[in-house]
Image (cartoon, grey):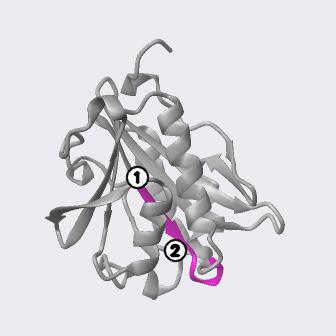
Amino acid sequence: MSAYDPKHFAAVPLCGARLDLEPLRLDHAAETAPALADPALHAFIGGAPLGGTELRARYARLLAGPPDPATTMWCNWVLRLRETGEAIGTVQATVVAGGAELAWVLGTPWQGRGLAREAAVVLADWLRERGAPALVAHVHPEHRASEGVAAAAGLAPTQVVEDGERRWEWHAPTSRREGAVQTLRPHHENGISGYE
């Protein structure tokens, strides 16, 4: 690929030191529903955990892709702990011409071990290697663990707060411009961001 272009993106298998990032499939819903069943995961974003049937329907919508795949691409992965084979969370990237928005969620039993950091770093590095000019994430300002995840992925907090979440950004040295990546959440259902 000669230039960064959203339509050339697709989730591919990625690996960290302890995690395998598997491109999302419908059958992942049966594994991830129990892993993400703790209502505490929704403390900062509202809502409630989805059961297997609802999560499968959500995954089907995500796999169907965005309304305009020529300008936006949704890339979704399930996090699998290599040591045990358990599906423990997800990471997502919504890729647009100006860069990508990252989101992550990790099941409560696996939090506090640096696994969300590992996944976010693997994802951010993959996007940078593919030429992303900017990366953003939205993190609740009281969620210190997720701020640590965003910082580990190379993002820095901005003064922008959208829907109660602080915008974190990274820009390639040649494209330093705050606000270069639009707020993407109204255009997709990808993002539960900020949970380690």
Give neighbour class at mark 2: few <14, some 14-19, many 20+ (Cα, 10 Å).
many
The residue at 61%/77% (across/down) is: 34
- Relative to 29, say whether 147 is above or below: below
Residue beneath label 1, please?
102
Q: Amino acid at mark 1?
A: Leu
Q: Amino acid at mark 2?
A: Glu
Residue beneath label 2, please?
196
The residue at 18%/45% (across/down) is: 179
Q: Is residue 194 left or right of residue 46?
A: right
Residue 147 location, x and y as percent? 40, 71
The residue at 80%/64% (across/down) is: 85
Residue 81 location, x and y as percent? 74, 64
- Give the magenta part as a residue range: 103-110
Q: Is residue 16 left or right of residue 41?
A: right
How many marks do you count on the picture?
2
Query: Tag 2's secondary structure?
Result: loop
Q: Nearer the viewer, residue 175 or 106?
A: 175
Q: Nearer the viewer, residue 144 or 52?
A: 144
Q: Is residue 136 left or right of residue 54?
A: left
- Relative to 126, say whether 170 is above or below: below
Q: Nearer the viewer, residue 178 or 173?
A: 173
Which residue is farthest right?
Answer: 83
Query: Tag 1's secondary structure?
Result: strand
